[in-house]
Amino acid sequence: MDFKRNDRGREREKVRFNIEAWSPKTELGKEVKAKTVTSIEEVFHAGRRIEEPEIIDALLPELNNEIIEIANVQRMTKNNRKMKFRATAVVGDGKGHVGVGSGKDVEVKAAIESSIVDAKGRVIPIILGCGSWQCLCGTKHSLPFKVEGRCGSVQVILKPAPRGLGIVASAPVKRMLELAGVKDIWAFSRGRTRAKYNTVVAVYRALGSINTMKNISEELVE
């Protein structure tokens, strides 16, 4: 595992596993190891569950990781208050794949590793497009339409923007959209946005809702 710090001064963890020494335990892992499955899109289309982070490392070698937040969390026991660190991580390859995860531990390093492993297990595909009426260039620089996501009191709305505008959003939302491969977007948020975990999860759900949209164009033609 390799730990690096990016140019912006925030921690970016390059946590990768040794694929050669990997001994898969799931059927999907064995197929990836044997190179029967060579694309992450095959896994998504088949609706198969990813239970080993090594699968993501093998199929998405360009995946980057970044820690969005490290916070203290406490719980009350019979004897005393137990304090742990909760790390929130975002992973993405900048080409339409992104994931969000969190991990808790009494040590910061262990919490970071756990959060990145959790984020890799939650990677989803993102459908990119050009849904802005001001642009209509046909390239995959934004989103195809407006999407919304919620987590707790936080609501995030993402609207397609014209090419060249950039990502108009807060720092954690912007970094997550960059890792997802979005280049131009309008982002609006409501609620307690200081809770970064809820904010990035709301963005994650908004992006994931694109995959659940029903295409009724063919039904209308019929």
Image (cartoon, rainbow, N blue to C red):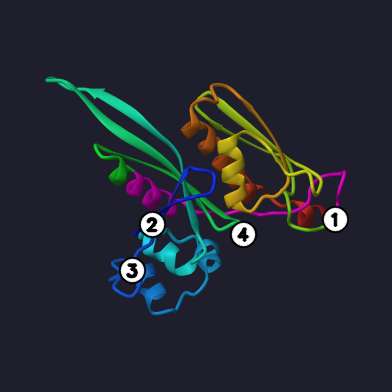
Residue 17 falls within the magenta-colored stretch: no
Which residue is identified by label 1? 137
Which residue is identified by label 4? 95
Residue 115 falls within the magenta-colored stretch: yes
Horizontal side of residue 188 vs 25, given as left or right: right
Say few, some or many: other residues with alpha carbon within 10 Å of mark 4 (under 14 / 14 to 19 / 20 or more): some
Q: Which residues are magenta?
A: 112-136
Residue at 39%, 68% (x, y): give it: 28
Closer to the chain start, of discs 4 and 1, is 4
Residue at 30%, 45% (x, y): give it: 109
**Of residues 29 and 203, the one drawn nearer to the viewer in this rendering:** 203
Residue 121 in view here = no
Query: In what element is the residue under mark 3?
Result: loop
Three-letter amino acid code at the position of disc 3:
Asn
* Quarter holding residue 14: bottom left
Q: How far apart are labels 4 and 3 at the CA level? A: 23 Å
Three-letter amino acid code at the position of disc 4:
Lys
Say few, some or many: other residues with alpha carbon within 10 Å of mark 3 (under 14 / 14 to 19 / 20 or more): few
Q: How far apart are labels 2 and 4 at the CA level? A: 19 Å
Residue at 73%, 46% (x, y): give it: 184
